[in-house]
Image: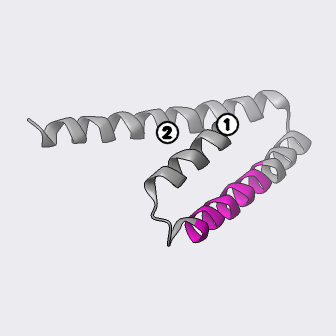
Amino acid sequence: MAFISGTDIIIDSTTIHTRAKTQGSIDVWVALGGSAGSLLSGVVVADSSYAILGFIYLALLLILVVAWAKYKVKQQEKYI
């Protein structure tokens, strides 16, 4: 569902002349990201456990949340 919504946002935010190239590039990066994530998670589980995989996921999630929060604060500071 999120992939379709993201694709729809890309379609709405590009011009007709660049739409196919942009969407194709994004589709390739999404596929590569999914493949890399699957491969790396398999390696982590094979060498350790699902618990370690969960902790790694949690750490990455926290990093993304902190980065997003800092970004939002910087955006708000621009308008003050």
Secondary structure found at label 1: helix
Q: Amino acid at mark 1?
A: Ile
Residue 24 position by quadrant = bottom right
Residue ID for mark 2: 64
Give the color scheme: rainbow, by chain, secondary structure or one colour.
one colour
Q: Magenta: predominant secondary structure element?
A: helix
Identify the mark at residue 77; answer none if there is no mark.
none
Secondary structure found at label 2: helix
| Separation of residues labelled 1 and 2 (CA atoms) | 12 Å
- Residue most toward the left? 80
Residue 23 position by quadrant = bottom right
Magenta region, residue range: 20-37
Residue ID for mark 1: 56
Left or right: 18 in relation to 5: left
Q: Quadrant of the N terminus?
A: top right
Q: Amino acid at mark 2?
A: Leu
**Residue 13 in magenta?**
no
Q: Position of residue 37 (x, y in %)?
A: 75, 49
Q: Nearer the viewer, residue 7 or 43?
A: 7
Q: Position of residue 74 (x, y in %)?
A: 23, 41
Q: Nearer the viewer, mark 1 or mark 2?
A: 2
Left or right: 61 in relation to 13: right
- The answer to whether residue 23 is above or below residue 12 is below
- Residue most toward the right? 46
Q: Please tell me which residue is depicted at 50% across the width and 72% down the height of the picture.
A: 17
Q: Please tell me which residue is depicted at 56% across the width and 66% down the height of the picture.
A: 22
Q: Please tell me which residue is depicted at 48% across the width and 50% down the height of the picture.
A: 12
Q: Please tell me which residue is depicted at 65% across the width and 61% down the height of the picture.
A: 29
